[in-house]
Image: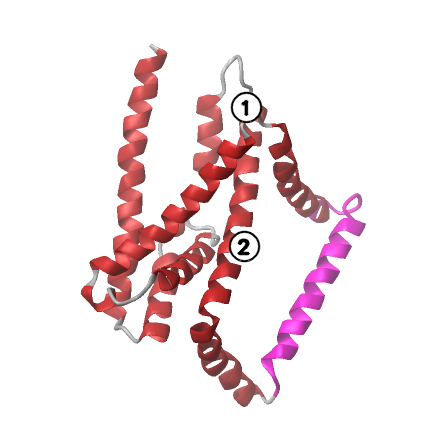
Amino acid sequence: LPGVGELLRCGYMSTKKSTYDKTFGTVVMERAWDVLAIIVLVALSLIVKWGDFGPYIKKSAMDSYSHSQGFSLWWIALIVIIAIVIFIWLTYRFRDKSKFCATVSKAVSGVFTGFKSFTQIEHKFVFAMYTVVIWIMYVLMSYFGLKAIPALSSLTLSDALFISAVGNIASVIPVPSGMGPYHYLVMVVLCGLYGCTNEIGLLFAVLCHETHAVLIIVVGTISYFRLHIHKK
């Protein structure tokens, strides 16, 4: 169940010294910085790999769509941007009159609250470094996954950066641990950009995703029993 882990963690960690809402506040802060990290990762990967990614998306998506529909895809992108701006303005404008607008506004303000709460924690530098190292490890996971498969071993760290960005975009889709969307998007990128077969692309996606899942299960189980013994 997507997101349930965060609620369970807050319930488990709630004690007499730390209430549920305070523990949930740490989750909000973590997720706010994760959103920022994903945006930075995607932007950085596009900058580094635009020479390969730009022509591919232009040829496979924009040109083909424009040819079939008779007008440029850039106009659709402009319309979407304008629609998003109008939606944000209407949500803010009617947040006191509409329950839906109030919910959306509260979610957005929660993200900003998460960023703001960073100023109140004691070890800011340590938190920032942990965040940076965690996301570096995500990229390295993809890098060593590429090196583990002979057909993809010639790809570089910049390729791993781009693949990690695509994988994290897939993780936004509300399914458990990105199961399915991650595998599909990574496979499509590897096949479309690097010319590998569907089997090789899926092999890489399974290798990275499932080793990550197994690691979480193993370390999580060890941590649970360690914490339980420590409490006793």
How many marks the image carries: the answer is 2
Q: Position of residue 67 (x, y in %)?
A: 53, 89
Instruction: Mark 1 and mark 2 in contact? Answer it, CB < 8 Å.
Output: no
**What is the secondary structure assignment of the residue under circle 1?**
helix
**What is the secondary structure assignment of the residue under circle 2?**
helix
| Magenta residues (range) | 71-100
Q: Residue furthest left?
A: 150
Q: Position of residue 4 (x, y in %)?
A: 45, 37
Q: Residue at x 49, y 75 (%)?
A: 54
The dominant secondary structure in magenta is helix
Q: Position of residue 151 (x, y in %)?
A: 21, 68
Measured along the vertical axis of the image, is residue 207 above or below residue 47?
above
Q: Residue at x 34, y 51 (%)?
A: 140
Which of the numbered marks, if any, corresponds to residue 39?
2
The kind of residue tagged 2 is: Ile
Give the mark nearest the N terminus, 1 or 2. 1
Is residue 64 visible in the rendered image? The answer is yes
Specify whether residue 190 is painted magenta: no
